[in-house]
Image (spheres, coloured by chain):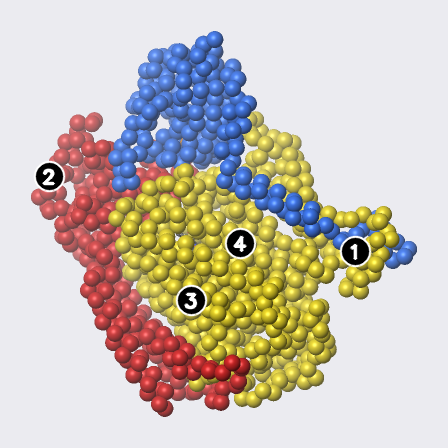
Chain colours: A red, B blue, C yellow
């Protein structure tokens, strides 16, 4: 009984300390830098899981440590432990019930609840004024088209692809993988993955399929503010994979419209 | 061989093998393995230097693989009449062959990336183009081209570069111009990444005799 | 066999006419070379001759490889040991009773076990060296060690492939399994010793194939060899498929052999209720291998045809995701193939070192078996970023649920240690470290099972950290626990307790400092498969690499310690841990016959209430020679 009490005390203490540490980590932001509501949702799910699991983690670690110190053998040879038992129905039952309960909890929240939220944000009724961006992944380059503004292949002054987004807007990325310049080659399409680390989601792009990714931007920021605000291919797609990157700028509505005009002028000049 | 044991019940072959042979061969095989894995280009380069001082005359077959050329080095002499028979051996990728010196670059998040050569070897060079099959596009730039047979799809922009579809071919026949020295060839397709992936080679042009 | 050997030694000097054979490994290499050259020439120059094609084409190298592996297997001894006896000739294969027996075909499960252990050790060192090269490259955000990204990506692929298929899948199954399963169930041999003797030699062949693959062309897919990318990769990808084919075939044969052995060769009295935990683990793993290895091999055959011919099976006009689905259908069970023996080892080592009866044994077995079953239902959690939305919730559900049977391994281990008389020596330390590391792997696994979190951390270094916590943290640490726990059994000697603990603490700290930080790299936006990355990640990567080198050195230190004490350590007692399982009830190391006579089991092996042995008529001890 004394051991159980001592162990419990240590466990509670370590759990409390662990929670303090974990909460300060969460406070700093486990995702480091976020720029969409989706990223906030993901971060909240992450935070919830580690918060709940901290005592569980502490239980096992403290148990290992406690056993190691309290029940270590102090003699040179091997001697059977004077205390022997095969089972403890109470302990086993609690263990099994708690592990089932915890997993069911996690499945309901945050798993199912967050997935529901994600699916919801894709629903038509919430998406009347989405900005639509056609994203084409080719080896090894991102191409961004803005069909609502007749812009194909938005570029910066160097000819590198660039992504501009207005703040506080739902953006629908329409994702396709093929090479528009070499349509004859069926082998040119491979799987890429459209990832903007600061946006908290990624979506693989499968050749022959059209996929969607929705985000809702929530702050003005850019690659220059934090390098996590960049498009980065996350699925290996050949030797050029590491170089498949493009800077992202989330700007105010006014700046966005200015940028659109500038791109339109650029394209008019080109053709 | 029907009997492996002789009348006294002994084996024909002695399985008491020699450790020396074992360790010797094993060490040799490991050495060859390591050399091939890490030093194959280096070793090939040494061989090239030792045996390939003679300039190639006539046709040189240049094969394009993913992402390398074969051969990786060519030697010519100014004034010789030569042909590059370019063959894309890949089943899946298109490749080009640009020849030049120095680089044009574009900035990126990972530093400057070479987009093509600064000096185009083909500037002002008369070249006869033949046997063009499955050519993705051909940029002539300032080369003075004449065509034999079907004329490939011409494009503009950048250095002289024939780009071949998978399985494609093209022959470039010309008299080596008076541009002696070291040149490079490379493939910059797919957003310059073939070059980054190692698709390049060198040409030595010897002065006229 | 041994009687023939002593005859031979006498006879040799008088009969100099007897031809001395080439060392089998050398002969195997020679036959492999001949096989390759003949077949390759036939294909590329005769049957499939094409204008301008080089001497080695995709088709010729594939068939040439098949001939080479055939030559290798026959050359190391399958010709005399398996083929000729099968054709009715008398067996003419004598294994010298010294170190040379490890370098030729053998039918002794202990020799085969050690051969597998050496092979996987070789794989570990090679792939570990590759990891060091990768970490060296990642010290800077720019290319500096590797000449081009393809070279780096091939190295990642070689590292992952060799680690998974020659270490993870092999070390505790083909290696310790082959050695200890017959000993633990009271048998003198496995069920199919000839097949087992042959299967081992596929491992070095497979490792060599994968390692040399970049010479054919730098493949970029990583250890999954995934389509559609593989369909347009340079030809090195062929040797990925072929090498892994050899390695998985070897594991498949091991699975057949060990399953049959556990089912049919148990000593009298060793009822299902008394089967030792490690045997349960190996049985569960072998069933997983039997179910899933043929599945992945078929997928590899399709991918191989896809790359040789080529066919558009998986290109955009085919079905691009099918390969990934097929791969992970095998791939998830694969990770349990790696970790289930580790769980079983905890439950094997802790009752012995705690000298306390195994706690809640039936739940331990239920855990192993249910993990095995559930592992086939979770594969798509590797594909949250590319699957249909409808698949998210069910796969998330099963993935979260699998942590319940997994937790039983902890339930049993912790319960066993509670109020034990725990010997805090090197194997115990490694076991506890393994439990700690897997706990982190498991907790981060729960995070990954959540789709919304997964969409952020998938394909980032967070995942790399997670799976290294499971494979190194749990499996490799348990592998070391096994090395030290069974060290007296394998070598007849004792390791040095002090240096053993130093080694354990060394790798534990270095491991956690390296891979613990991988989580943060991933959360901070470091994606996978990149030799170049934005410069803000450079400081952390630089410092992580330093710890990675420390980890590499730590492993080398441990192996040196093991090798040294194997030859020079003090002679150990037959049963230094006072363990009750059968492998300890015979000489250390066991003689040519494990048990003579075969023991009769009269009680379970995990009862430490008293010091009664679980067997009747304890076998006569053979002198250790
Ligand atoms: C010795 C210490 C080790 C270090 C420092 C190390 C490091 C790494 C690194 C840096 C990567 C590349 C991650 C990426 O960019 O995707 C990697 C990948 C990998 N490692 Fe390790 N590793 C080690 C040991 C192991 C072990 C023991 C195993 C398994 C038994 C293993 C299995 C893998 C696998 C499967 C991959 C994925 C390869 C792929 O993406 O195709 N590693 N490792
Ligand atoms: Cu990509
Ligand atoms: Cu990529
Ligand atoms: Cu190319």
Estimate the spatial distance between the alpha carbons at disc 1 and disc 2, rounded to whole Å.
87 Å
Q: Which residue is mark 4?
A: C123
Disc 3 packing (10 Å; few <14; some 14–19; many ≥20): some
The x and y percentages for residue C19 are 81, 47
Q: Secondary structure at mark 3?
A: helix
Q: Tell me: is circle 1 under 8 Å from ligand 1.
A: no
Q: Which residue is mark 3?
A: C505
Q: Are marks 1 and 4 in contact (CB under 8 Å)?
A: no
Tell me if residue B171 can be seen: no
Q: Which is nearer the eye, C145 or C172? A: C145
- C474 shown above or below A89: above
Query: Image check: C316 left or right of C106?
Result: left
The x and y percentages for residue A2 are 35, 90
Q: Are marks 4 and 2 in contact (CB under 8 Å)?
A: no
Q: Tell me: is circle 2 under 8 Å from ligand 2.
A: no
- Of badges 3 and 1, the one in the foreground is 3
Q: Secondary structure at mark 4?
A: helix
Disc 2 packing (10 Å; few <14; some 14–19; many ≥20): few
Q: Chain of mark 4?
A: C
Q: Which residue is mark 1?
A: C92
Labelled disc at residue C73: none
Disc 4 packing (10 Å; few <14; some 14–19; many ≥20): many
Q: Which residue is mark 2?
A: A258
Count up the numbered dots: 4
Tell me if residue A149 can be seen: yes
Q: Chain of mark 1?
A: C
């Amino acid at each position: 009984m004394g051991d159980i009490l001592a162990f419990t005390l240590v466990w509670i203490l370590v759990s409390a300390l662990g929670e303090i540490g974990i909460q300060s980590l969460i406070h700093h932001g486990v995702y480091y830098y976020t720029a969409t509501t989706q990223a906030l949702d993901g971060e909240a799910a992450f935070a919830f899981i580690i918060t709940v699991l901290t005592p569980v983690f502490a239980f096992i670690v403290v148990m290992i440590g406690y056993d190691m110190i309290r029940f270590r053998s102090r003699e040179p040879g091997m001697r059977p432990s004077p205390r022997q038992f095969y089972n403890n129905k109470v302990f086993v039952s609690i263990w099994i019930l708690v592990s089932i309960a915890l997993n069911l909890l996690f499945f309901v929240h945050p798993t199912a609840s967050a997935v529901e939220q994600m699916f919801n944000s894709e629903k038509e009724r919430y998406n009347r004024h989405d900005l639509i961006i056609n994203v084409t992944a080719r080896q090894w380059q991102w191409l961004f088209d803005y069909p609502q503004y007749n812009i194909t292949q938005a570029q910066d002054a160097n000819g590198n692809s660039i992504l501009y987004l207005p703040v506080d807007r739902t953006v629908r990325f329409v994702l396709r993988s093929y090479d528009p310049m070499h349509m004859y080659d069926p082998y040119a399409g491979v799987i890429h993955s459209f990832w903007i680390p600061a946006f908290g989601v990624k979506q693989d792009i499968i050749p022959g399929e059209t996929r969607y990714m929705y985000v809702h931007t929530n702050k003005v920021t850019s690659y220059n503010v934090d390098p996590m605000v960049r498009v980065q291919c996350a699925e290996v797609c050949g030797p050029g994979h590491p170089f498949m990157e493009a800077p992202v700028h989330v700007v105010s509505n006014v700046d966005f419209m200015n940028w659109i005009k500038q791109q339109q002028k650029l394209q008019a000049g080109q053709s | 061989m029907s009997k492996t044991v002789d009348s006294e019940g002994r084996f024909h072959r002695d399985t008491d093998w020699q450790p020396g042979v074992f360790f010797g061969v094993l060490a040799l095989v490991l050495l060859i393995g390591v050399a091939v894995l890490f030093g194959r280009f280096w070793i090939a380069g040494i061989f090239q230097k030792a045996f390939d001082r003679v300039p190639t005359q006539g046709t040189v077959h240049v094969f394009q693989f993913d992402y390398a050329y074969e051969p990786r080095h060519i030697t010519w002499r100014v004034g010789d009449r030569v042909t590059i028979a370019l063959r894309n051996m890949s089943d899946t990728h298109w490749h080009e062959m640009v020849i030049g010196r120095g680089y044009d670059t574009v900035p990126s998040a990972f530093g400057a990336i070479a987009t093509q050569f600064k000096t185009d070897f083909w500037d002002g060079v008369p070249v006869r183009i033949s046997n063009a099959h499955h050519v993705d596009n051909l940029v002539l730039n300032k080369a003075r081209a004449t065509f034999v047979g079907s004329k490939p799809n011409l494009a503009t922009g950048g250095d002289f570069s024939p780009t071949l579809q998978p399985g494609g071919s093209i022959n470039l026949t010309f008299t080596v111009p008076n541009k002696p020295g070291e040149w490079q060839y490379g493939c910059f397709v797919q957003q310059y990444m073939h070059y980054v992936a190692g698709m390049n080679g060198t040409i030595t042009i010897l002065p006229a005799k | 066999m041994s009687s023939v050997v002593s005859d031979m030694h006498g006879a040799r000097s008088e009969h100099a006419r007897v031809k001395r054979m080439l060392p089998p490994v050398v002969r195997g290499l020679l036959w492999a070379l001949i096989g390759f050259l003949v077949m390759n020439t036939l294909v590329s120059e005769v049957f499939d001759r094409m204008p301008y094609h080089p001497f080695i084409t995709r088709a010729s190298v594939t068939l040439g490889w098949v001939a080479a592996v055939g030559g290798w297997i026959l050359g190391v001894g399958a010709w005399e040991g398996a083929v000729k006896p099968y054709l009715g000739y008398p067996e003419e294969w004598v294994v010298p009773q010294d170190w040379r027996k490890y370098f030729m075909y053998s039918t002794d499960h202990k020799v085969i076990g050690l051969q597998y252990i050496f092979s996987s050790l070789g794989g570990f060192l090679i792939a570990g060296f590759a990891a060091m090269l990768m970490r060296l490259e990642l010290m800077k955000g720019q290319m500096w060690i590797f000449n081009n990204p393809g070279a780096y990506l091939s190295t990642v692929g070689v590292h992952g492939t060799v680690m998974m298929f020659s270490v993870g899948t092999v070390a505790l199954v083909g290696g310790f399994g082959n050695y200890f399963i017959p000993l633990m169930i009271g048998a003198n041999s496995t069920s199919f010793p000839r097949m087992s003797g042959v299967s081992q030699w596929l491992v070095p062949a497979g490792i060599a194939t994968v390692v040399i693959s970049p010479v054919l062309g730098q493949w970029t897919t990583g250890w999954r060899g995934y389509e559609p990318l593989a369909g347009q990769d340079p030809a090195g990808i062929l040797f990925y498929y072929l090498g892994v084919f050899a390695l998985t075939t070897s594991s498949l044969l091991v699975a057949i052999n060990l399953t049959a052995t556990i089912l049919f060769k148990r000593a009298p009295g060793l009822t299902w209720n008394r089967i030792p935990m490690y045997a349960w683990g190996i049985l569960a793993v072998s069933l997983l291998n039997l179910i899933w290895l043929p599945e992945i091999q078929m997928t590899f055959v399709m991918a191989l045809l896809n790359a040789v011919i080529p066919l558009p099976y998986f290109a955009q006009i085919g079905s691009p995701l099918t390969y990934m689905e097929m791969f992970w259908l095998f791939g998830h069970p694969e990770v349990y193939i790696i970790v289930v023996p580790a769980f079983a080892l905890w439950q094997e080592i802790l009752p012995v070192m705690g000298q306390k009866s195994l706690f809640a044994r039936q739940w331990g077995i239920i855990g192993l078996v249910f993990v095995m079953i559930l592992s086939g239902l979770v594969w798509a959690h590797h594909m949250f970023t590319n699957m249909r939305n409808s698949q998210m919730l069910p796969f998330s559900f099963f993935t979260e649920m699998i942590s319940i049977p997994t937790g039983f391994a902890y339930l049993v281990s912790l319960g066993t240690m509670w109020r034990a008389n725990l010997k805090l020596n090197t194997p115990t330390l490694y076991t506890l470290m393994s439990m700690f590391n897997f706990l982190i792997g498991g907790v981060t696994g729960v995070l990954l099972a959540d789709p919304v979190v997964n969409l952020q951390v998938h394909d980032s270094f967070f995942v790399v950290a997670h799976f290294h916590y499971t494979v190194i943290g749990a499996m490799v640490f348990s592998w070391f626990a096994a090395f030290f726990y069974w060290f007296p059994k394998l070598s007849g000697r004792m390791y040095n307790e002090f240096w053993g603990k130093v080694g354990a603490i060394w790798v534990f700290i270095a491991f956690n400092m390296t891979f613990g930080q991988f989580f943060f790299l991933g959360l901070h936006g470091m994606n996978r498969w990149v030799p170049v990355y934005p410069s803000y990640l450079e400081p952390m990567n630089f410092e992580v690499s330093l710890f990675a080198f420390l980890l590499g050195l730590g492993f080398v230190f441990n192996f040196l310690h093991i090798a040294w004490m194997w030859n020079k350590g003090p002679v150990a007692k037959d049963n230094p841990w006072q363990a009750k399982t059968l492998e300890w009830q015979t000489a250390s190391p066991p003689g040519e016959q494990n048990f003579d006579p075969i023991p009769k089991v009269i009680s379970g092996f995990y009862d430490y209430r008293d010091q009664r042995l679980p067997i009747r008529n304890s076998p006569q001890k053979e002198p250790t020679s």
